[in-house]
Image: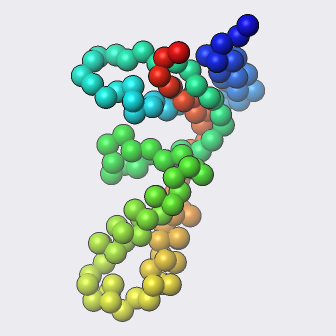
Amino acid sequence: METTTENATQALLKLVRDNPEMPVVPMVNYELVADDCSYWQGSFGKAELTEIYTDPDKEMGVYIKGWNDDELYEEIYEQLCFDRSEEENDTLTAKQKEQQAKTEFDAIPWKKVIAVYIELPD
């Protein structure tokens, strides 16, 4: 009988065989790295083809397309408001501000990857 880890490993290997040109990116569960150890043991969780964006302004900040799009859009919207002058913020309509944020969001350079979710050990 196969364990969850064995099933996840087999799924990962199949994705790699079927998509050899795609990088494999480990997506580590925050619960694994919550102390001062040098290494942490984890287990292979789900593996999938997805798209990610790593925010250069955030240390280790990564977004997974379809998971936290709303959060990323809000951050873009807020940053645009912060970057504008008070006068410009006052003269733009809410719809214009939303359109600017949407334009920025739509221009995000998503990267296609095989994401492997690293979870707590079995």
Residue 84 lies, in percent from the top left, at 30, 78
Q: Is residue 110 left or right of residue 62?
A: right
Rendered residue at 50%/84% (across/down) = 95
Residue ranking furthest to the bottom: 91
Q: How many marks?
A: 0
Q: Is residue 106 visible?
A: yes
For residue 116, what is the image quadrant? top right
For residue 28, what is the image quadrant? top left
Q: Is residue 23 visible?
A: no
Residue 33 lies, in percent from the top left, at 35, 27
Rendered residue at 66%/37% (across/down) = 49
Residue 10 lies, in percent from the top left, at 70, 17
**Quarter holding the N terminus?**
top right
Q: Is residue 63 left or right of residue 36?
A: right
Q: Nearer the viewer, residue 11 or 23?
A: 11
Residue 107 lies, in percent from the top left, at 53, 62
Vertical arrangement, residue 103 with respect to residue 42, above or below: below
Q: Nearer the viewer, residue 7 or 116?
A: 7
Q: Which color scheme did the rendering employ for the protein?
A: rainbow
Vertical arrangement, residue 39 with respect to residue 103, above or below: above
Rendered residue at 29%/16% (across/down) = 38
Vertical arrangement, residue 3 with respect to residue 27, above or below: above
Rendered residue at 47%/71% (across/down) = 101
